[in-house]
Image (spheres, helix red, strand yellow):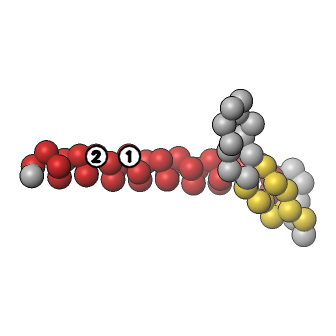
Amino acid sequence: MAEVYARAPLPGVRTQVVKIPVYRMPGDVLAGMLNAALARDQEQADYRKLGDELEGAASTS
């Protein structure tokens, strides 16, 4: 097994480095990148939902 390190190269922004285990190239790399993107999307949605809930709780107080 090998490992690939990937990150999104955005100017002026330090992005997270993701370690992807690889048994087969390029399939495992592509799948790992997709899984990392989906996890970031879910994390963003979770934080947005939490923020909305906190905002709603603050307005009812």
Residue 37 is situated, as x and y percent measured from the top left of the image, at: 62, 47
* Residue indicated by mark 2: 52
On screen, residue 43 versus residue 35, left or right, reads left
Q: Nearer the viewer, residue 33 or 59?
A: 59
Circles 1, 2 touching at the beta carbon (< 8 Å) = yes
Residue at 78% x, 59% y is 20
Amino acid at the residue labelled 2: Asp
Q: Residue furthest bottom?
A: 1
Residue 39 is situated, as x and y percent measured from the top left of the image, at: 57, 54
On screen, residue 56 versus residue 47, left or right, reads left
Q: Residue furthest front?
A: 12
Residue 19 is situated, as x and y percent measured from the top left of the image, at: 77, 60
Residue 15 is situated, as x and y percent measured from the top left of the image, at: 68, 44
Residue at 73% x, 52% y is 17
Element type at marker 2?
helix
On screen, residue 22 versus residue 47, left or right, reads right
Q: Nearer the viewer, residue 36 or 8?
A: 8
Viewport quadrant of the N terminus: bottom right
Residue at 9% x, 49% y is 60
Q: Residues within 10 Å of mark 1 (few under 14, many from 20)?
A: few
Q: Residue furthest left?
A: 61
In whole angstroms, how far apart are the C-alphas of marks 1 and 2? Answer: 6 Å
Can residue 34 be seen here? The reply is no
Q: Nearer the viewer, residue 26 or 45?
A: 45
Amino acid at the residue labelled 1: Arg
Q: Residue furthest top?
A: 11
The dot on residue 48 is 1
Element type at marker 1?
helix
On screen, residue 50 versus residue 14, left or right, reads left
Q: Residues within 10 Å of mark 2 (few under 14, many from 20)?
A: few
Can residue 45 be seen here? The reply is yes
